[in-house]
Image (tube, rainbow, N blue to C red):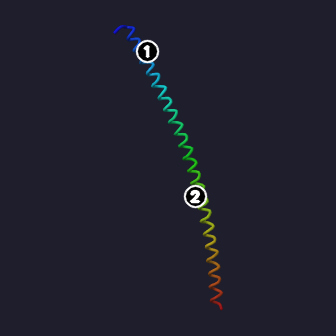
C-alpha cells in the first residue's frame, strides 16, 4: 500500500470519527433534552401531588370539625331528651 493510499485511509478514518462524534453529540443533546423534559414533568406531577395532599389534609380537618360539631349536637339532643 502506497503512502498516498495510507494517507487517504487516515483521512477517511478521521472523517468517520468526526461523523461519529457529531452523531454522538446529537444523541447526547436529545438525551439531555428528554431528561430535562422528564424532570419538568416529574416536578409538575410532584407539585400537583403535594397540592392535592395539602387540600386533602385541609378537607380532613374540616370533616373532623364538622364531625365534632355534629357529635356535640347529638349529645345535646340526647341530653335534652333524657331530661324530659
Residue located beneath label 1 in the image: 11
Query: Element at badge 2?
Result: helix
- Residue 48: x and y, percent? 59, 53
Which residue occupies 44% across, 18% down? 14
Residue under the image location 63 percent in, 86 percent down: 79
- Seen at 48% across and 32% down, the residue is 27
Q: What is the number of the mark on residue 53?
A: 2
| Position of 51 relative to 36 (above/below) | below
**Residue 23 against residue 10 in the figure, above or below:** below
Furthest residue toward bottom: 84
Alpha carbon of mark 2 to alpha carbon of mark 1: how far?
62 Å
Dot label at residue 59:
none
Crowding near pointer 1: few (<14 within 10 Å), some, many (20+)?
Answer: few
Counting the numbered discs, the total is 2
Q: Image quadrant for the N terminus?
A: top left
Choose the circle earlier in sequence order: 2 or 1.
1
Amino acid at each position: 500500500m502506497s503512502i498516498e493510499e495510507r494517507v487517504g485511509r487516515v483521512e477517511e478514518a478521521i472523517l468517520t470519527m468526526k461523523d461519529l462524534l457529531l452523531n454522538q453529540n446529537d444523541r447526547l443533546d436529545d438525551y439531555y433534552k428528554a431528561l430535562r423534559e422528564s424532570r419538568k414533568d416529574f416536578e409538575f406531577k410532584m407539585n400537583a401531588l403535594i397540592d392535592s395532599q395539602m387540600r386533602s389534609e385541609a378537607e380532613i380537618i374540616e370533616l373532623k370539625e364538622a364531625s365534632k360539631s355534629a357529635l356535640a349536637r347529638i349529645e345535646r339532643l340526647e341530653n335534652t331528651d333524657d331530661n324530659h
